[in-house]
């Protein structure tokens, strides 16, 4: 009998399953209505027998957290759509009815848990605390003891209660990650500029309050919120990306192609898809954390490749590393606008190139930039063994950065790819030809080039169009892609002049014109000609 009691004490019955003492990973799901799953219909959710093996605890509804929320009743159950609960009636203010459907809904927790279970086979537990229409300062502020922190406190309280309830049943929960879907309610003139700091502060507080310093934070938002008409959504997206690049164990999860029910919410398929993206990003983060870092600083993901953010000479830089570097470590250097129109950049990394960028904005390629670029070049070639010659990528004003550095360092350049590139600042931003010009940026030219007068600027002979001889002598091949209807950086005042003068100097230049195209979009829909040009000149017989 005594032996039997010992055996029985080691097990317990829970939701129809027999559990021994065990350890499970715990993942938190939180945020606003797309974390709730407001428009994700349970009737559209395919069944999965794995749901019975995943522990689930939730509180979801409308702010503030109260008795009207849908909850698991303060106890563990298994993964499932959540019922509508007892929403406040009539609907008013921020009372939205918990879910759009009478039979409730589900958030990204289901796609996330199912994907992890299928890939890893590990036992999981999910705690969800999500509330529709909530914003950082209004609901998720850990420093606000009043209503402004109510949702944050609910997340912490539900997590602690769930951990304690599991422990009472001999289940130890290991906090693994936070899947955060929020930001739409901060997409306004007041909150958007404060969003990055507010979210960063909340993540720091959560790690502290849950004693989980290694908690991975996965950040997402409905990027199409507002149907493309909300002008503050790009700021929210960039804030999440910036935080992911700076904060340790933090990653941005792109939801751009997840299907939507309307201009506010993902549909059921989109919600499942977002969950799967969380799972994939989480697993990649953990692979990155376990593998040795190739470069210092923060490691994250860009287009499926490892990205490293650090500083050189006091300036932010980044390096994107290929899965397998080509012999000699060829590399491409983006002059400006990293990540914009980047299909050629990504294809190069896929071919074995490293991709790099140094952030020195609003300097327009002036001579003061050169020492910083020199320092970055030295760091990459001497410390990390990059090839002695780089391929330069200059989009728009990036042409000034790339060409001016190349002209000063022709022996360090394998080739130049210039796209709708500024090659004479009198054309842009000066607007002294037929282009629109930019007063703000012309004022910047006056400032950063240290001109005492406009006459001095107009007489300056240091523009790329005036100094092509060193490149021609070094036999540096050029590729220019341009739109012949560009009224911002007119091609005939920039690319056209470069082409005419470079040919007269005996230089090799290739032109790809795009009939009827203005300044945007940059690049080519099929980047193969660009990629092959760079591979041909920067990856063959690489000099170390």
Image: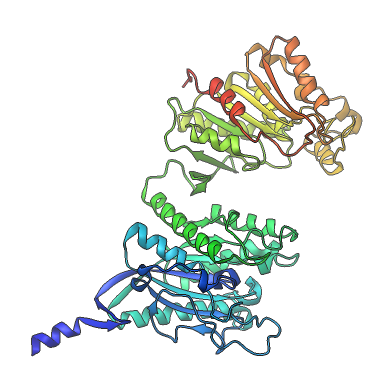
Residue 63 x %, y %:
61, 81
Q: Is residue 51 depicted above or below 93 in this figure?
A: above
Relative horizontal placement of residue 450, taking residue 122 as reference (left or right): right
Asked if one can make out residue 106 in the rendered structure from this viewpoint, the answer is no
Q: x%, y% of residue 211?
A: 42, 71
When asked about the image quadrant of residue 120, the answer is bottom left
The image position of residue 7, as x and y in percent, is 14, 82
What's the residue at 63%, 22% (across, down)? 409
Q: Nearest the camera: 271 or 306?
A: 271
Front-most of residues 432 and 377: 432
Which quadrant is home to the N terminus? bottom left
Taking 196 as reference, is 521 above or below it? above
| 464 lies left or right of 282 | right
Residue at image point 45% right, 83% down: 72
Q: Is residue 125 left or right of residue 129?
A: left
Colour convention: rainbow
Q: Residue at x 31, y 61 (%)?
A: 121
| Nearer to me, 286 or 114 | 114
User: Would you say residue 138 is visible in this rendering?
Assistant: yes
Q: Quadrant of residue 230?
A: bottom right
């Amino acid at each position: 009998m005594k032996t039997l009691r010992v055996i029985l004490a080691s097990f317990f019955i829970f939701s129809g399953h027999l559990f021994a003492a065990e350890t499970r990973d715990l993942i938190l799901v939180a945020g606003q209505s797309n974390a709730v799953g407001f428009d994700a219909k349970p009737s559209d959710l395919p069944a999965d027998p794995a749901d019975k093996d995943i522990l689930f605890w939730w509180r979801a509804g409308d702010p503030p957290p109260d008795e009207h929320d849908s909850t698991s009743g303060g106890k563990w159950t298994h993964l499932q759509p959540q019922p509508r609960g007892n929403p406040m009636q009539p609907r008013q203010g921020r009372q939205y009815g918990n879910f759009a459907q009478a039979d409730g809904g589900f958030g990204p927790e289901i796609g996330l848990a199912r994907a992890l279970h299928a890939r890893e086979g590990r036992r999981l537990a999910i705690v969800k605390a999500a509330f529709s229409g909530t914003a950082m300062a209004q609901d998720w502020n850990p420093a606000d003891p009043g209503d402004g922190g109510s949702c944050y406190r609910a997340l912490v309280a539900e997590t602690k209660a769930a951990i304690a309830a599991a422990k009472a049943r001999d289940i130890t929960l290991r906090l693994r990650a936070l899947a955060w879907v929020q930001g739409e309610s901060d997409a306004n003139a007041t909150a958007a500029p404060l969003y990055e700091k507010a979210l960063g502060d909340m993540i720091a507080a959560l790690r502290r309050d849950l004693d989980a310093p290694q908690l991975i934070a996965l950040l997402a938002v409905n990027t199409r919120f507002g149907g493309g008409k909300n002008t503050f959504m790009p700021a929210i997206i960039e804030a999440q990306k910036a935080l992911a690049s700076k904060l340790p164990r933090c990653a941005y999860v792109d939801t751009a192609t997840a299907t939507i029910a309307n201009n506010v919410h993902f549909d059921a398929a989109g919600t499942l898809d977002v969950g799967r993206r969380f799972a994939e990003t989480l697993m990649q983060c953990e692979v990155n954390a376990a593998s040795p870092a190739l470069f210092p600083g923060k490691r994250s993901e860009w287009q499926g490749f490892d990205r490293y953010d650090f500083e050189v000479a006091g300036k932010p830089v980044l390096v994107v590393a290929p899965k397998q570097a080509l012999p000699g470590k060829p590399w491409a250097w983006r002059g400006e606008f990293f990540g914009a129109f980047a299909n050629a950049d990504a294809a190069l990394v896929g071919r074995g190139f490293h991709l790099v960028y140094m952030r020195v904005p609003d300097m327009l390629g002036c001579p003061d930039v050169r020492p910083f670029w020199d320092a970055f070049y030295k760091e990459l070639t001497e410390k990390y063994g990059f090839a002695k010659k780089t391929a330069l990528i200059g989009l728009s004003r990036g042409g000034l950065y790339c060409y001016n550095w190349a002209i000063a360092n022709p022996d360090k350049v394998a080739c130049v790819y210039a796209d709708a590139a500024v090659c004479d600042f009198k054309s842009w931003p000066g607007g002294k030809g037929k282009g629109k010009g930019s007063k703000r940026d012309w004022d910047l030219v006056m400032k950063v080039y240290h001109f005492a007068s406009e006459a001095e600027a107009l007489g300056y002979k240091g523009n790329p169009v005036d100094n092509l001889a060193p490149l021609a002598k070094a036999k540096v091949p050029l590729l220019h892609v341009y739109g012949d209807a560009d009224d911002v950086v007119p091609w005939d005042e920039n690319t056209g002049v470069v082409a005419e003068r470079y040919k007269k100097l005996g230089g090799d230049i290739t032109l790809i014109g795009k009939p009827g195209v203005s300044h945007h979009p940059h690049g080519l829909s099929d980047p193969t000609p660009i990629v092959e040009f760079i591979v041909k000149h920067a990856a063959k017989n690489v000099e170390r």
